[in-house]
Amino acid sequence: MERDIQELAKEVKEKGLSDQGRQALQTVLKERVTVAPGVPIAPTPAPSTQPTQPSPNLPDYTQAEPADVKLKIEKLLDLAWHKGVKHAAKEASAAGPLILDAFHDALIDKLYPEFKKRGLLK
């Protein structure tokens, strides 16, 4: 993950976006986390009727989604921390648009504070 942070920071600086803060990180990650052409989009399962605990790692709009959708996003975040953003983004792109967008948003929410702490973004 450390390597990914350095690569993302380099891309942000190369594009001259470092003064744009959170938007800069969104721009760079959006380029990496996209649906791959020709990859079938998995259907989103029907919402579960069982209530689930809100996850602090996931965007608010996912709270009404089934537990398996939230679990998939959590697993992708864990994969990003352990095997890298590129690896997790590849899997996210095959999981469908909801999971891909939620993964992207959750990743930004986790990475942005780290970039701020390191002085990589304003």
Image: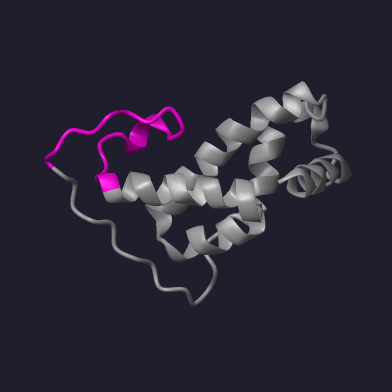
Q: Which quarter of the rendered picture does the C terminus lie within?
A: top right
Q: Is residue 96 left or right of residue 109?
A: left
Place residue 119 in its image quadrant: top right
Q: Is residue 30 left or right of residue 62?
A: right
How was this image coloured? Answer: one colour
66 or 39: nearer the viewer? 66
Asked whether residue 94 appears in the rendered view, the answer is yes
Q: Is residue 50 magenta?
A: yes
**Residue that lies at the very extreme toward the front in this rendered image:** 82
Q: Is residue 65 left or right of residue 74?
A: left
Residue 8 percent coordinates (x, y): 76, 45
Residue 11 percent coordinates (x, y): 81, 47
Q: Which residues are magenta?
A: 49-67
Asked whether residue 21 appears in the rendered view, the answer is no
How many numbered marks are there?
A: 0
Residue 38 vs 73, above or below: the answer is: below
Residue 120 vs 46, above or below: the answer is: above
Place residue 111 in its image quadrant: top right
**Residue that lies at the very extreme toward the left in this rendered image:** 49
Residue 19 percent coordinates (x, y): 80, 27
Q: Residue at x 66, y 53 (%)?
A: 84
Q: Residue at x 28, y 29 (%)?
A: 53
Q: Residue at x 39, y 52 (%)?
A: 72
Residue 71 percent coordinates (x, y): 36, 47
Judged by its main secondary structure, the magenta piece is loop
Q: Is residue 103 magenta?
A: no
Q: Residue at x 57, y 56 (%)?
A: 88
Q: Is residue 64 left or right of residue 28?
A: left
Residue 40 vs 46, above or below: the answer is: below
37 or 111: nearer the viewer? 111
